[in-house]
Amino acid sequence: MKTVGLVVASLVGLILVMVAFGSWFTVDQGERGVVLRNGAFVRVADPGLGFKTPFIEDVIDLSVRTHKRVYDKMASYSKDIQLATIRIAVNSKLDPSRVREIYEQFGKNYEERILDPAVNGESKIVFGQFTAKEAIEQRGKLQAETEKAIRDALEGSGILIDSVQIENIDFSTEFEKSIEARMQAEVEVARLKQNLEREKVQADIARTQANGRSDAVRAEAQAKADATLMQAKAEAEGIRLRGDASALAIQARTNALKNQGADIIELTKAERWNGALPTTMLPNSVTPLLPIK
């Protein structure tokens, strides 16, 4: 009887310990606890210490932190039917206000049932709108449109998208070789165009310099011609002025000679006058006199 009593006491003590430890739980920060009673939803527990009914209630932890989910080697076709494998990283989190709804509909594997189909489907649709060349050259635009498409597809689902990154795009070896050859050809064409533009600039500079020298020679010749013309005009004006001066001098001598001749005539008259006045005079006439100078 004593042994039976010890066994019973041990069992009761064990049950009490199990009840004590099974009646409380903790939820980590960044998680939410889904409390189930015999598999039926009871409530959502916030971070911290919580209590539950032992043996009949369980707690399922769901993370509401942002975490990264990588989708590697997703096969997609471009607009020009080029096969590529894409690596996409999606940073997402569970909306804390939708924990009950998400768990009731999808359980703990909600990412596999909601997020994965949206990422796979939308990324392939968007990638199919770009040619292989555009996917390489417009990587930023491809990533932005892919992120928008995934966000729109998950609108109202309870999963929040923080960011989407296209980490890698791999095409077939043959296509990558053709892209490399094409880029080398484009680089060569760009180099030739650059050389042509440089030669055009050099030709323009040489043409400008030649025009400048021609203008300088023309200006110098024009200056010499203008100087010669001005000198000729000056010489002609000098000749004209000398001619006018000579004509005036001749005229002055002529006038002087005329005046001198008149004086000589008067002098001759005076020298030949005998001093006798005329003996006969008309009435009211004036007695002639010799001019005195």
Image (cartoon, grey):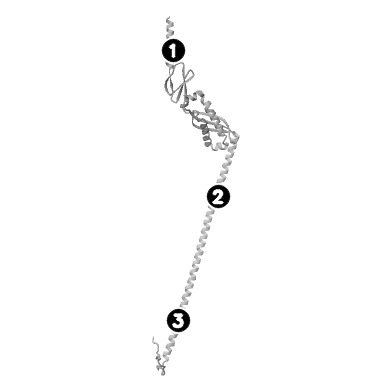
Dot 1 lies on which element?
A: helix
Asked if residue 186 can be seen in this view, the reply is yes
Type of amino acid at the residue the image marks with label 3: Asn
Residue that extends furthest to the bottom in the rendered view of this protein = 279
Q: Residue 220 location in percent, x, y?
A: 51, 61
Q: Residues within 10 Å of mark 2 (few under 14, many from 20)?
A: few
Residues at circles 1 and 3 in contact by the CB criterion of under 8 Å: no
- Measured in 3D between alpha carbons, the distance from the residue under mark 3 to the one under mark 2, in whole angstroms, is 81 Å
Dot 2 lies on which element?
A: helix
In this rendering, which labeled residue sits more in front, label 3 or label 2? 3
Type of amino acid at the residue the image marks with label 2: Lys
Q: Is residue 251 above or below residue 138?
A: below
Q: Residues within 10 Å of mark 3 (few under 14, many from 20)?
A: few
Q: Within the image, what quadrant is residue 124 found in?
A: top right
Q: Residue at horizontal 52%, vertical 37%?
A: 141
Pick whichever of labels 3 and 2 is earlier in the sequence.
Answer: 2
Q: Quadrant of the N terminus?
A: top left
Residue that extends furthest to the left in the rendered view of this protein = 292
Pick whichever of labels 2 and 1 is earlier in the sequence.
Answer: 1
| Left or right: 215 in relation to 21 | right
Q: Residue 10 location in percent, x, y?
A: 43, 10
- Could you say which disc has been placed on residue 15 in the image? 1
Q: Residue 21 location in percent, x, y?
A: 43, 16
- Measured in 3D between alpha carbons, the distance from the residue under mark 1 to the one under mark 3, in whole angstroms, is 168 Å
Q: Which residue is mark 2?
A: 200
- Could you say which disc has been placed on residue 85 in the image? none
Q: Which residue is mark 3?
A: 255
